[in-house]
């Protein structure tokens, strides 16, 4: 559970280039529809319901996530490289827990 | 004596059959997720109109990439690309992915920005059964475009 999220961003890019960002977060993404085989009770829902990616504080990409997103949520998206700066990634779990990561990118 | 023994045996047999029966139902239930109705195409349409606010949805611009057959519904790759320059005055604001055959029609909504550079998003989703998947894109000028594709699912990925 406490594994670090995996993020792939190029370390450097040329100004104006469109780069690809890939993120993977290890999480079971419990749908709330599954039953515990021993007790027969529904396992409560616990998913990552929001993912955000910011660059120098400005939102580049975000996702509102429903239980139909697979376990270990993976997202790949694009970003235009305009200036040197830092990406911030945030994953919000049901219940409000936020896990974040950051990556620097040099733009020349 | 013999009669009561006989009835006892009968009862046992009946109990056994009943138990076996419920066992089978329980088995089926775990496979099919009991008490949870699957979304119908109408539910998906309703979800889409919630996203669009009732506005007309045009075809085109959106390309939805899915495998033709998903052997494992637990993790199905999906890519949505929208034909757009992603500049400050002409960009894709949102991309919604909607299911016509999962327990709920909602899968995910992506918010993009002019900084995205390209409207190109990939993710992995769960598919409960063979169904249509719809991708709806909201453009910055308030128009909507959509694409629909069928996916065949061998083993559903919802009950676990």
Image (spheres, grey):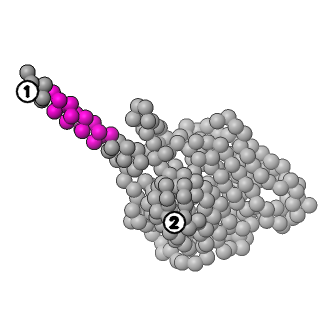
As drawn, is B79 to the left or to the right of A106?
A: left
Which residues are the magenta region? B8-23
Q: Locate the N terminus of chain A by quadrant.
A: top right
**Compared with residue A72, is residue A59 higher up or lower down, i.e. above or below?**
below
Residue A27 visible somewhere in the drawing: yes
The picture places residue B101, in percent across and down from the top left corner, at 44, 60
Q: Residue at x 52, y 42 (%)?
A: A30
Callout 2 environment at 10 Å: few (<14), some (14 to 19), or many (20+)? some
Q: Secondary structure at mark 1?
A: helix
Q: Residue at x 74, y 66 (%)?
A: B117
C-alpha separation, residue under disc 1 versus residue under disc 2: 59 Å
Q: Is residue B113 magenta?
A: no
Residue B111 falls in which quadrant of the image?
bottom right
Q: Is residue B15 magenta?
A: yes
Q: Main secondary structure of the magenta part?
A: helix
As drawn, is B152 to the left or to the right of A3?
A: left
User: Disc 2 marks which residue?
Assistant: B151
- Mark seen at residue B3: 1
**Compared with residue B10, is residue B112 higher up or lower down, i.e. above or below?**
below
As drawn, is A62 to the left or to the right of B31?
A: right
Q: Chain of mark 1?
A: B
The picture places residue B157, in percent across and down from the top left corner, at 50, 52
Q: Residue at x 75, y 56 (%)?
A: A21
Q: Chain of mark 2?
A: B
Q: Can marks 1 and 2 be said to lie on one chain?
A: yes
């Amino acid at each position: 559970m406490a594994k670090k999220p995996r993020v792939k961003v190029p370390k450097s890019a040329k100004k104006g280039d469109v780069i690809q960002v890939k993120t993977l977060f290890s999480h079971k993404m419990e749908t709330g529809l599954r039953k515990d085989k021993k007790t027969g009770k529904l396992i409560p829902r616990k998913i990552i319901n929001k993912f955000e990616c910011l660059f120098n504080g400005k939102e580049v990409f975000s996702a509102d996530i429903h239980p139909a997103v697979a376990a270990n949520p993976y997202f790949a998206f694009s970003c235009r490289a305009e200036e040197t700066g830092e990406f911030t990634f945030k994953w919000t779990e049901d219940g409000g827990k936020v896990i974040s990561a950051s990556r620097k990118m040099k733009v020349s | 004596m013999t009669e009561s023994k006989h009835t006892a045996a009968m009862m046992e047999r009946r109990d056994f059959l009943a138990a076996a029966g419920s066992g089978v139902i329980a088995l089926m239930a775990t496979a099919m997720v009991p008490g949870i109705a699957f979304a119908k195409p109408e539910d998906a349409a309703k979800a889409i109109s919630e996203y669009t606010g009732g506005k007309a949805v045009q075809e085109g611009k959106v390309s939805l990439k899915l495998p033709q057959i998903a052997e494992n519904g637990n993790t199905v790759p999906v890519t949505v690309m929208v034909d757009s320059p992603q500049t400050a005055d002409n960009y894709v604001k949102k991309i919604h992915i909607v299911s016509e055959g999962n327990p709920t029609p909602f899968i995910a909504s992506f918010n993009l920005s002019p900084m995205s550079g390209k409207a190109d998003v990939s993710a992995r989703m769960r598919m409960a059964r063979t169904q249509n998947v719809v991708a709806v894109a909201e453009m910055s000028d308030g128009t909507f475009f959509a694409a629909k594709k069928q996916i065949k699912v061998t083993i559903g990925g919802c009950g676990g």
